[in-house]
Image (cartoon, coloured by chain):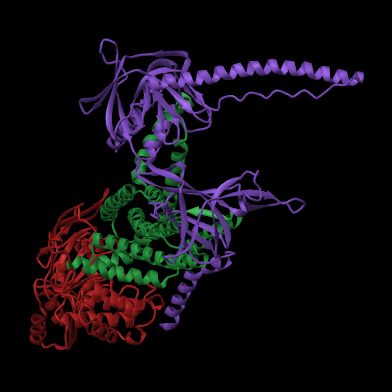
Amino acid sequence: MKKRYLIFCFLLISFFLSSVEVFSAAPPKKREIVYSLNVWDGKDYAAPFYPASLDTIYVMADFENVYSVKETLVYYWPITREYMADWDGLNKDVGETLEVLKGNRVVGEYKKVDYVFYYPKGYWGGGTQLFTGENARAKKKEYDRAMDKYWKEVDQYYKAYDEYNKKLQEFYKKIQEGKPAGKIPVEPKQPKAPTFYVTDVSKAYVFSLPEGRYTIRAKDKNGKIIPNTVKTLIAFSHRREGIGYNIIPESKWTYPETADDSSDIIYQYREGTLYFQPYKEWEFNELEYNKLSKPQSAGRSDRWVWVHMEKASKIRLNIFSKNNLISQIRERPYYVEQIPGSALGYNIRLLDRKEYPYATADFTAFKFSVPPTGDYKLVAVDNNGGIIENSDRYIRPITATDARNIFIASFGPLIVGLIVYIIRRVGR
Amino acid sequence: MIKTERLYKRYDKVEAVKDLNISVEPGEIYGFLGPNGAGKTTTIMMILGIIKPTSGKILVFNKDLYSDYFGIKRKIGVVSEVQYLYEDMTAYEYLSFFCDLYGVKNKNSKIEELLHRVNLFDRKDDLLGHYSRGMQQKIGFVRALLNDPELLILDEPVSGLDPTGIREIRDLILEENKLGRTVFMSSHILSEVERISHRVGILNKGRLVAEDTMDNIRKKLTSEVEIELEIDNFDVEAEKRLEALPFVNSVTKEDSRYLVRVKADRDYRGDLVNFISSVGGSLKEIRRKEMSLEDAFITITEKNISLFSSEEVTE
Amino acid sequence: MSYRWVVIRSIIKREARSSFFGLGLYIASTIACFVSAFIFNSYINTVEGNNIMVMASPLNTPLFYAVIVATLYTAISSSTALSREKDKGTLEVLFYGPVDHLSVILAKFFEDIISFLIIMFLVTLYFVYAAIATNLGFSISYLYAVILSIFIAGSMSSFGLWLSSLTARIRTSVLLLIVIMGGLLGLQFLQNYILTLKPEDLSLSMVYVMGILSNVLRVIRWASPFSYLMNGINAVALGSTSMYIENMLGALVYTVILLTLSVYTLKWKGVRKV
């Protein structure tokens, strides 16, 4: 018996000791060599950073990405529960060369180049483009010129505005004195700032890689590998391409839904109208895609996510019922007309350019009025009439208006049981 | 049929069965006796493989049970003291289930035949939960006989039954024995065992203290036999000569009836008849008073005697 | 066919008959359907409220709850399967005949699976009705989920049988099941909570306690049949084939281990009425 207790105590102590490893987690702010990246996420460039504790870098294959090796201060930020870089405290570029290896073979050796990001619709407008080398410098000059021109226009505007103010005061004075004032002075027009934006020219390693698993490392000017810069680099690609849909129900146009996968079924309450906004979409591994922009986030390697890349254009939607084409829909502009008075509410109307030449559309979409019964299949086809892969979705109107019968039917098995039970008792 | 060798069963500090060596021969009815807690049921459960012995060997049909578990079990029928039945089943369904279990062919005719024998055919579609104790016991017997077993193991088969029930079960056991089945029967109803057993084994405090025919057990237990005589024309002189006979231990008289205690080494009734005739006495009745199994059982268990050593057992 | 299979088949037949004529199975099916009805109701309300609902396999969520009910029935039924027979003495009577520990455990296990299939059949009939009445429609993932649920029911049954082999009274085995189920589910919820925390947020002593807990949970991940249920449902929801197969194999291995353990436990504890 004593032996049994001793074994139990031994197991218990071993168990407790095995948990000591957790003590190693400590959150001080410390100097670290980190990777700072600008990676293409399919829609825009994200800027993840990889502290020393992360050993794998994720990038999208066949797209140019920007790699920097920096020495900075790293600290743990409990609010977002992730490691952060204190770039203001320390932001030192380290290394001269970046090497990419496939197995033990060096497949790429990169030197720093000039690069800029070009934002054609402004910083928040999306559609970011990367320029390197001479193109980067040219783009930057273009931006600087545009900005110089703008500032000059602003300067001229303020001068003209001063002049305008003076003329206006004189104009009012003459009127007050009862003298002829002539025409009212014309206010000068404000200059328009450039809509695009270009970042300052910086230096970094810029390259794209085909899909695969690599090792990345940075070397100093003496060709020595910089400690803590050896990491695994995964260049991943998408699994499938398709069409995803943003769906606006007519009755609640501010609460759109998305249907990204072919297995998604779109349910509509009885008859109603749906507006489809199709997007080109790519399907990525969830873990890889999550890590791409947020390396410290979690993700599942066995799960796949569709990412809307850009609005699908030059397509039409075909609607089938039992394999018969019942409707072909084209994209149209719509506007939302508020109903005045106490009734409130709104109507979604087709924007007729001839009728309202100056009106702007609230959205453009493919409209489909779902019949009250049956099931329908929606497929996107391109200009040549070819069906676009992974663009099909089923649309089903929900036919039950209340669940009373469904609740009543749930007692079916009990009725079967009672019948069996009675048959057993009576039949014996 | 059944043979145990140096069989032991120990529960923590209690020895339920000690050094048990029994042997049940083919075709016999073996009465397995012992007071409550003597280890009878434990022994039966060990024979059936339900309880694992601490040590020792059990042979059934001259084989270790686990050398042919299913084969041996299919040749055994067992009836326990209390019938644990599936009370939600009818008698027919219950017996049909056991027929399937034993792989009985022509199960319907077999069930019908056996139910007729125990007069329960008319109740075959009644739920077993509605059966009386006696009826349940009969169903237990029918279940045990479904597979035409070569060996019937009965654990207190008539316990709790009324006299009619006891007689029915007794008759059934005797009939089955006549059909060639070996019967191993434990009981504490000694008169029943005495009436039908060919041999008995007596278990006391886990130890087998006697295993023999009834006659031999009696002989081993007693040093004298009582013979009752009723004699006319038997005078005082003749009485004195009777007392003086070498095999006579004592004589008690009451009117014309004499209780003569003689040595138990052999049957002296012939000698007594010859003597009475030689002295001119007229013998009207001679009767040997037998030691009952109950007397023997009480003698053995209360005095804790082992007939294997003819001495009291030392723990 | 070996004689053991004749025995197993006979016991399965008896047990299945008993379940079929009893009410337990139908009550469990009704509860499963009734719980699912709430999900169907919530679908109708959602579509009515938002005018739209997008869902890949709408039947899988109600099926998830139906499977929980059905597997709980399996667990309760199996956890009392041996103890009830021990308590009533009928198990001992079976062992008078050509029945051994393995055949009893296997027979009880397969009977549990048959009962589970009957429940799933009744539930599926109900789902067909609900799917037609609402026009929700069926998808192939429903079939995948049902197939996986059989393996999960297997792990539940083997777990229940093991508990049952430990005890000789119905009350004890039910109590044991409730305590263990409560404990395992509690730890599972704790695990989900812990996953939301980071060691850096906690005091050193709490970090230490968390370390111990995470070790306990690591073991429970493999020891609790509920893990297989949760992971199985996740696998179907995610449509992950690898996770689906992994979970199926995991449940199968778990079942085999627990059934083996049950056989040895039954041998150790005995089959007699106490």
Residue B115 visible in the current orientation: yes
Tell me which residue sits at (34%, 45%) in the image: C223
Quarter residue A400 falls in: bottom right
Residue B222 visible in the current orientation: no
Using the image, determine if residue B235 lies above or below residue B249: below
Q: Nearest the camera: C174 or A229?
A: A229
Tell me which residue sits at (60%, 54%) in the image: A250
Q: Position of residue C255 (x, y in %)?
A: 30, 53
Q: Position of residue A283 (x, y in %)?
A: 39, 43
Q: Nearest the camera: A262 or B23?
A: A262
Tell me which residue sits at (42%, 60%) in the image: C70
For chain C, give the colour. Answer: green
Left or right of A43 on screen, residue B24: left
Left or right of A13 on screen, residue A151: right
Q: Nearest the camera: B268 or B74?
A: B74
Tell me which residue sits at (56%, 25%) in the image: A194
For chain A, give the colour. Answer: purple
Chain identifier, red in the render = B
